[in-house]
Amino acid sequence: MDVIASLCKRRGFIFQSSEIYGGLNGFWDYGPLGTQLKRNIREAWWMDVVQRRDDVVGLDASIIMHPKVWEASGHVGGFADPMVDCKVCKKRYKADNFCEEQGQELIRTATGFALPPGLQCTSCGSKDLTEPRSFNLMFKTFVGPVEDGSSVAYLRPETAQGIFAQFSNVLDTSRQKVPFGIAQIGKAFRNEINPRNYTFRSREFEQMELEFFIKPGTDAEWHAYWVNERMKWYASIGLPSSSLHQDVHPKEKLAHYASACVDVQYDFPFGRQELEGIAARGNYDLSRHQEFSGKTLDYFNQETNERFVPHVVEPSAGVDRIALAILCNAYREEWIAKGKDEGAAGQVIEAELGKPAPEGYEARTVMRFHPRVAPIKVAVFPLLKNKPELVAKGREIFESLRSVWPCFWDVAGAIGRRYRRQDEAGTPYCVTVDFQTLQDDTVTVRERDSMKQERVAVKELDHLMWQRLR
Ligand code: GAP
């Protein structure tokens, strides 16, 4: 992770939030390449979950909603982690991790939690600890000028509730019929006690959530359908099936209203962890909002004369976690034969991390992003920056390509150095404009992974990129 985090900082994928002030734990900023990577993830999700389907529509709900939303959803009462404080040095711990680190298990009681004997503060060694106390993970704020109990509101801890709260309005305006879905991408906030593993567990993050409303009794088949769809989507953005896993929750561990839940997990360098949860949640959410709002949130099927509160299947994914998985999956260090690095088989070996390249080889770091998510799709280089005719021709090609794709223009340094910079950024194709271009209107197209070069007519470039970049 350290190697990947260092590349992310050096190349402008991810920075610590407010770094010049020492950072803020659990918050991250995305630099130019990271921003584009995240945009591509969102767009790929929106394309496959919304745009290419007849039965899903979009929503963009507000981050701060009526506080009753969170009472209905159960977040005010139940979205809490038990915490333990050291009474001497005041250090605060998440109770389950605190016990686990000392080889013990947190005890569940009828009313909450209790600590097993013999634990001590790992900071000062004191055994004077509080009993576990609940700590709500929602960020609180106040709406309006008066800061009292009546103006308390919360930053949403998930985007899903905005969808449930707008179920009727979307149904009435979109001409959809059950089964259909409402999709939303947006920020969510959780005051995580223990943000960790780089961006994996953050306090501000982004979710891509679909609530797919179905007829009661069809839950199992729609759940299986969405698990399958989501696994295909992960393959389409280049995450290999060998690194992805389905964690099927056993029935006894499901919430009382849920009939199935599968987590999609990825093998991160710090272990196997969740990217997305796909849950069949029955009609719990809509029923709770009916109860708390007093408004009817049911569906009337005119063909069969049936009225029911729809059940829901919810695939809920995290943009930041998917970005991190893509970064981890893409990272490679390779050794390539010096001087003749472009193409021929046998001249590339996978580097041993941390070791210098052997005699006759040089190291390259390459981000093998799938073209669908690569932040920059094509880089354009005029061979020499002091030849105006090469620069002008290069610029013409660049302007044409960048009206469709995110592109990069680089005139500085030897071509080999320019290739290396794009390898690190994960750019799938580099186009070089040379003297032959001026004679026959062809360019060199160099592919990132194989490093093979081919000569392509300028008029074929657009078509070639359409074929290869999607
Ligand atoms: N509406 C269901 C829901 O919010 P969740 O499992 O709590 O379910 C869904 O969150 C997804 O959101 C997770 O699979 C993960 O990708 C992302 N996520 C949750 N908490 C996160 C955090 N603290 N940092 C980054 N991503 C997070």
Image: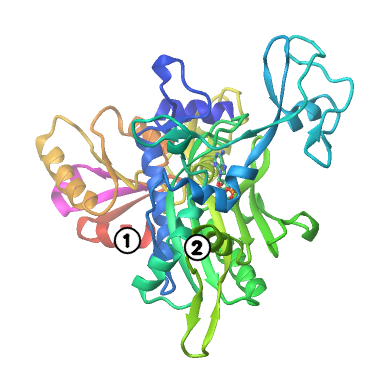
Residue pointed to by mark 2: 294
| Nearer the observer, 328 or 159 | 159
Name which residue type carries label 1.
Trp
Highlighted range, magenta: 431-446
Residue pointed to by mark 1: 466
| Nearer the observer, 202 or 419 | 202
Q: Which of the 4 quarters of the picture holds residue 451?
A: top left
Q: Residue 321 at what x, y percent from top left?
A: 54, 43
Residue 39 magenta: no
Residue at 15% x, 40% y is 390
Q: Nearer the viewer, mark 2 or mark 1?
A: 2
Residue 439 magenta: yes
Q: Mark 2 or mark 1: name the one nearer the start of the chain.
A: 2
Vertical side of 293 occupied by 452: above or below:
above
Q: Which of the 4 quarters of the picture holds residue 423?
A: top left
Q: Residue 382 at what x, y percent from top left?
A: 21, 38
Q: In what element is the residue under mark 2?
A: loop
Q: In what element is the residue under mark 1?
A: helix
Visible residue check, residue 347: no
How crowded is the residue under tag 1: few (<14 C-alpha within 10 Å), some, or many (20+)?
few
Q: Is residue 436 left or right of residue 136?
A: left
Name which residue type carries label 2.
Gly
Q: Is residue 255 left or right of residue 316?
A: right
Residue at 35% x, 30% y is 417
Residue at 69% x, 24% y is 93
